[in-house]
Amino acid sequence: MGVAVTSLTRFLRPYPHRELFGALADSVEDGVLVLDGMGSSILAVNHAFLLLTGYTRKELERLTAEALFPPDTRFADSPGVPVPKLAVRTHAGDSLRLDVWPYPIGNPAAAILLKVRSSAERERTLRQARLEEDRLAHLIEISTQIAESPMDPKSTVFGLAKQVLSAEFVGVYRASPHSPDYLLDGALPRDFPQSLPPVSLDPLDRPSLWSIGTRPDHPLHKAARAVGLKALRSTPIGSPNAWIGLFVAGWQDAADLPKDVIGLMEVLANLYHAKILMGMHREVLADLEGQLDRVRRELSSSLQAVQEGLISVDTNLRVLRANSAACQILGYPEGQLKGQAIQDVLVGSADVMTTLLDSLGHQLTAERAQLMLHRRDGRPFPASLRVVPQEEGLATRLILVLNDLSERKAIEDQTETLAQRALLGEVAAIFAHEVRNPINNISTGLQLVASRIGQDHPQHGALDTIRGECKRLDQLLDDVLFFARPLELKFTPLSLAELVDRILARWEPRLQLAKVGTHTNYANGGTRVLADERTIEQVIVNLINNSVQAMTEGGTLSVHITADGAGSQLLKIADTGPGIRPEQLDRIFDPFFTTKKSGTGLGLAISRRIMTAHQGSIAVESFQDAGTVFTLQFPLAPGDKGE
């Protein structure tokens, strides 16, 4: 042991070996302190340790280890075991936390070499290492958030940028579309200006650094010094020919600046630039989508308003869309035509596919003026089809315009029927006029013969029968002429109650003879309707006559007048006869249809024609073995409210 101590003492004494040790120790970045084997006396120290503690070499040579380290510190008891955060007294009397690694020299130890390092520096190094590890993850998260959400002061993007840069504050001065100044976006301290004029960015047209001890010439530098920042960096955003902003970061400790801070700030500035461009593109896209949506709605409204059926099909002849008219024509609910093959939709006797393929192949409009198609339920209907091809490359290749000709066909058939009826009416009028004179002559001749042969003659009864048939033919001719000639109506305010009372008064003897009682109920008898009294009386008389004839064994005739609440007045005539069979009910208003042996079959047809001319209606309800009710509906006279 004495030899080892002597060797170390010789090595540390002031001759060439000691100078070599001092030069070697001073070249080490960590602090070095050499104690004697007992750990009490200081034998040597390097320059790094002097910088950490603030002592000079001479001051340390006069001190013992107990003056530097806490009492009961025994480095010899734990050789090679690091002691973290050991409190060391500095020259200023402060307590400095150091990490100490003791290395014994010799065996047994003749001296103890202590390697020391600032605990704060170690923690800073570890923190920087963790930041380096997390930095890439933070950059990825920033890029993700920039792509998904707006970059505003409430966003966590600035918080992540602060972690990437280990900065105290991060913000952006961004060009404003509403102001020539650059507006602050981010959470910089209040001393920083909320906006910067464009001229203020000219000196910062490249990455720049301000640190404490440098003259603050720029407003941002002055603000940084005012809030106690030790360093402030800025990086322009955009291209050299078009700066759109300035990225700013501040540190309270210059030692926290990352080594690659310039590159990191340029990356963040580029990400923010990309966000601005994406935001502009997104706004343009949103505007275009809004315009497209409006165009779609307008187009959809226009298509729904079109009465023709419109169907668009793709290259594979499948339905892309169809308007409401097309669905209604073909008998499909809304939306069910989409995606179906057109040959399964346009089903008919004609080959529709040939027309579609011809139009698609030759790029020419094809048209089928008339063809027979079938609705979804199998019912056939006449239709017309026009096929219009579209440009290649579009989703829609053909537009089909479909027209349902059923209504037109019905109108054409009705027009033809009316024309035939008009012609028949003219013929019937001529026929009635030509036949009436011979019938009158026959009736007169029969009357003359009957008077000459007397009532006792065996043929007198036959002559009376023939004369009755002549009268029936004459009545039939009157009805035919009335039905064929145009109605000449004179509309005046008319009280239905007063008209019915007059008619019933005239019919009283006949009703008593037929054992028919009457019952009237006028809920609003004072109300007047607009009608032609002569023809309306004819209708009422015809209905009363039919009712009396139906009640062969007597009964009750009821007349009821009321309002329907829709600006009209109702007149109901009911009997207690046997009723009308259901199979006859739909035909009773047809001309020449009758259930009576002596009837002409024109009475109800004429009545319906008269009510139609009055802009009213006639309806019937019949109950087997209970009776029949006819309802006449009249429009009220102007000024009458039907109350």
Image: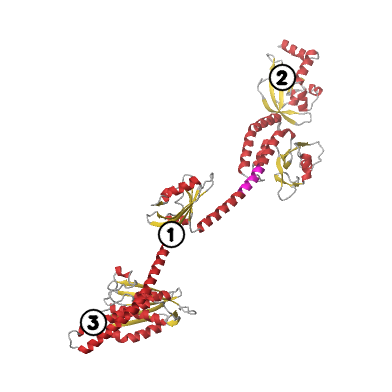
Q: Which residues are magenta?
A: 275-286
Element on which disc 2 rests = strand
Amino acid type, residue under disc 2 in the picture: Leu
Q: Residue at position x 79%, y 16% from top? A: 19
- Which residue is disc 3 drawn over? 465
Label 3 close to label 2 by CB (< 8 Å): no
Q: Say which quadrant the N terminus sits in.
A: top right
- Which residue is disc 1 drawn over? 405
Between 625 and 42, the residue placed more toward the observer is 625
Amino acid type, residue under disc 1 in the picture: Leu
Quadrant position of residue 327: bottom left
Residue 366 position within the rendered picture, expressed as x and y whole percent measured from the top left: 48, 51
Tell me if residue 472 is in the magenta stretch: no
Q: Is residue 248 visible?
A: no
Q: Residue at position x 59%, y 49% from top? A: 289
- CA distance separating discs 2 and 1: 111 Å
Between 140 and 125, the residue placed more toward the observer is 140
Element on which disc 1 rests = loop
Between 637 and 454, the residue placed more toward the observer is 454
- Which residue is disc 2 drawn over? 113
Quadrant position of residue 411: bottom left
Q: Is residue 375 above or below residue 87?
A: below
How many numbered marks does the figure carry?
A: 3
Amino acid type, residue under disc 3 in the picture: Thr
- Magenta-drawn stretch, dominant element (helix, strand or loop): helix
Between 18 and 597, the residue placed more toward the observer is 597
